[in-house]
Image (spheres, rainbow, N blue to C red):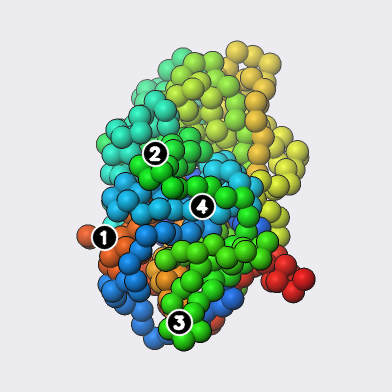
Amino acid sequence: MTNRHNHHNFIVRRVFAIYATFVPNVFNLFPIVFAFVAPSRQFGRSSFHSQPKLLMSASVDSKVDHVVIAGAGIVGTTTAYFLAMRYDVRVTLVDPTGSIAPAASGKAGGFLAKDWNDNSPTEALTRRSFDLHQQLADELGANTIQYRRLTCAAVSVDPFSSRRPNGKKLSTVEWAQHDDLAQNTVRGMQPLGDESTIAQVHPKRLCEELWKAAKKQVGGNSLRQGSVIGAVHDDESGRLQGAKLGDGSLLECDALLFACGPWTAPSMMQGVKYHSVVIPTSRVLSQCVFFSGCGDPEVYVRPDQTAYCTGFPEAAVVVDEQPGEESIREDKLQTILESVRDASGISGTGDGVLSQEPVLGQACYLPTSIDGIPVMGRIPEQLGCYVAAGHGCWGILLGPATGEAMANLIVNGSSIPNVNMEVFNPTRFATPWNIPTAAAAALIKK
């Protein structure tokens, strides 16, 4: 398996079990959905150490009226939404850019699959979150956040083959029905899901509408440009007094959530950089395609007559780029574009569905924990402090249920029904977590 991070293995195994009969190189077919929570500039906390066990159902540290959330991506905005809508709790989002979803959560593909995480640690969280996406679409407006149900297919291609494919295999490939997908390139296809299990949403629009609704519900909610560099606790009681910001000020609060993507705890988190291009389509399509062959590009079609195309991840690294300032490699963008056109049999000069020039090229980081499982829960030995990060390729999908779970944990001290939070316990790692980030540490030394 090439160009794939180890934390995706459970997805690979599931797809292999279902589709190995028709695609020899099936290990390249599983979805890379850019569900990133942005890396943060100078986000952080001093440090916390693992303990043998952390009870997720423990009582709350104190009455919660105001929560500070470091990070304005999908985890931060969904948590803010549920804190406001269900508990009337005031929230201050703190983000280095002062904007909503400035990095990965604003540059994701927004692909949602209900059952692709079955038989994995995130199965219950995934199924709950898939249902919540529908509820949020009903509440926020499906058209506003570009939410819709659609289908998905794996398509095996070989642009150099002269063998004609079976016409029946092409009958369910939406693009091939109108000769947009060059039929001589297709070697086979397999459905990966229909409208009952597949959906999509525009991630940035979702984050923006979640925050808009949260502000409407609780008038005191605010978004602040800045950096959380630590938490301040009372020396005697140990209770949280507030979040220490990079400018030296104290932002008083009853709870502090770190939702900072790959920088949440650099000793346990890394970022995998992906590039993507957005291409206008000749008409509205409703079938996402994972190609096998021609570099294995992934194409997420959108209802605004565009297609989000991605692939070719870089190696996992400790992220030193800042949110909204990710460097973009033009050669990567060109590689993705050529791969998509080769896979679909388009030269770039015709009238094919993906023949137009891109309107957007971008890059972002996928945050992943060292064991590939999200980290969600209380920070040991730090009263009132919480963490939620490391959702890997499913960040947008898992965002709503993560926000719901963290809001309930912060306010009530317990998890949500049917979701076992213990599997995401931060204390499962034997080595200490080191927060703040390197950038925050450098700022503290000044």
If the image is split into quadrants, where does the N terminus sit? Answer: bottom right
User: Real-space Cα distance between discs 1 and 4?
Assistant: 23 Å
Q: Which secondary structure lies at badge 2?
A: helix
Residue 391 in sight:
yes
Graded by Cα atoms within 10 Å as few (under 14), some (14 to 19) or many (20 or more), the crowding at tag 1 reads some
As drawn, is 18 to the left or to the right of 387?
A: left
Between label 4 and label 3, give the one nearer the viewer: 3
Q: Amino acid at mark 2?
A: Lys
Kind of residue at disc 3:
Gly
Say which label, 4 or 3, has the lower sequence index. Answer: 4
Other-residue count near label 3 (Cα within 10 Å), few / some / many at <14 / 14–19 / ≥20: few
Reading the image, the residue beneath label 2 is 216
Gap between marks 3 and 1, in whole Å? 27 Å
Indicate the amino acid at tag 1. Answer: Ile
Q: Nearer the viewer, residue 91 or 309?
A: 91
Q: Nearer the viewer, residue 413 or 55?
A: 413
Instruction: Identify the residue at image location x=39%, y=38%.
Output: 216
| Residue marked by disc 1 | 416
Q: Name the N-terminal-most of marks 1 and 4.
A: 4
Residue to which mark 3 is pinned = 238
Which is in the foreground here, disc 4 or disc 2?
2
Q: Earlier in the sequence, mark 2 or mark 1?
A: 2
Q: Is residue 45 left or right of residue 129?
A: right
Check disc 4 and give the amino acid type.
Leu
Neighbour class for label 2 at 10 Å: few (<14), some, many (≥20)?
few
**Is mark 4 in CB contact (under 8 Å) with mark 3?**
no
Disc 4 target residue: 93
Q: Viewer-nearest of labels 2 and 1?
A: 2
Q: Position of residue 404 (x, y in %)?
A: 33, 54
**Label 4 to label 3: alpha-carbon separation:** 24 Å
